[in-house]
Image (tube, rainbow, N blue to C red):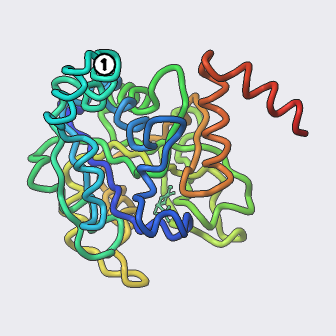
Amino acid sequence: MKKIKKAVIAVAGMGTRFYPITKVLPKEMLPIIDKPILSYIIDEVVESGIEEIILIISKEKELIRNYYSQNIKLEMSLKEKNKLNELQVIKDIVPNNIKISYVIQDKPLGTAHAINLAKDYINDEPFAIIFGDDIVDSKVPVLKQMIDIYKKYDCNVFAAKEVDKSNVNKYGILKYKNDSTKEVECIVEKPNINEAPSSLATIGRYIVKPEVFKEISTLEKVNREYILTDAFEKMMKYQSFYACEFDGKHFDTGNKLEYIEAVINYALNDSKYSEYVKEFIKKNI
Ligand code: G1P
C-alpha cells in the first residue's frame, strides 16, 4: 500500500462570506490569536506525516506565499538585535523538511478544477485534499485518523460529521452501505432537506486515489463550476470509499460565528489566555 505523502490544500476561494476584510486579506490568513487559520491546517498535515504540500492559491493571495517563505533580512535584523525568541517564532512558521509548492488558480472554476491543477505534482499515488476553511481541534490530528482508515481498507476516505438537518444543503451528504464499517454507498452534493439521504456531512478533508484526475477530466460544469463531489460519485462505481467520523471539534472558519467560536476555543486551550478569557466572559454576560 502506498504511503500518503502529499496534501493538496485549496485556498483559492474568494471569501465572500467574510467580506469586507477578505477584500484584501485571504480568508485563510485571518488570525486565530497570532497564527493564520492556514497554519493550524499545516500543523495538522505535518503531524499526520505528510512530506509535501501543494497550495492552490489565486493570484490575489500572494501574501500566503510571502508568509511561508524565508525572510532572510528580517531574520538577520532579529539576530543583530539579539531577539532570539522572536527569531525562532519566525523560523518556526515553515515546518522543517516540508516542501511547499504553489499553483495559481486563475479562474474561479470550482473545487475539481482547483484540485486538477495539482495533477503534475501527485504522480500515481493516493493523496490528501484539504479545503482551507475547515479546521479541527483534536488530540489525534484528523488527517491522521483518516490515514488510519485508509491503511485498514486501502480505500478513499471522507472526513464526516453529523450536522443539523436544516444545514444539509451546504454540504456533500453521505449514505452508508454498511453502518458498522462506515462504507459509503453514495454522496449527494448539497441536497434539499427532503432529498438528503442522511445528515452526515463531508467536511473539507479527503484521502483520494489518483483515479480522481481521470474522473475530473470527464466532468461537466454545474452552475459554472466543476464540483469535486461529482468526480467522487463517478469513482464510487469501481472504488471503495469509507467515512471517518472523526474525534475532534470542527470549525468552518468561513462562517463568522464559527470563526468566533474557533478563536475562543483556542484561547481557552492555551494556559496563557484561558483564565483571563473565562473571567472576561463571566464579567460581560
Ligand atoms: C465543499 C464541497 C462539499 C463539502 C464542503 C465542506 O462545498 O463541495 O461537498 O461538504 O465543501 O466544507 P463548499 O463549502 O465549497 O460550498
Which is nearer the eye, 55 or 2? Answer: 55
Which amino acid does the dot numbered 1 rest on?
Lys
Judge from the rendering whether residue 31 lies leftward or rightward of residue 239; answer left or right.
right
Badge 1 local density, few (<14 within 10 Å), some, or many (20+)? few
Residue drawn at x 63%, y 56% as measured from the top left? 256
Is 172 on the left or on the right of 106, as rendered? right
Q: Position of residue 114 (x, y in %)?
A: 27, 63
- Residue 23 lies in what quarter of the image? bottom left
Q: Position of residue 244 (x, y in %)?
A: 49, 36
**Residue visible at 28% across and 22% down in the picture:** 87
207 over 119 or under it: above or below: above
Could you tell me which quadrant the C terminus lies in? top right
Secondary structure, mark 1, is loop
Q: Residue 127 appears at what percent x and percent y? A: 25, 42
Image position of 211 with respect to 154: above or below = below
Q: x, y percentage for residue 126?
A: 22, 41
> Which residue sits at x=63%, y=60%?
197
Looking at the rendering, in which quadrant would you find the N terminus?
top left
Q: Is residue 242 above or below residue 103?
A: above
Residue 91 in view in this figure: yes
Residue 1 in view of the camera: no
10 sits to left or right of 146:
left
Q: Which residue is mark 1?
A: 83
**Considering depth in this image, is 230 or 81 the residue closer to the camera?**
81
For the point 42% across and 59% down, the residue is 25
Q: Furthest residue to the front? A: 81
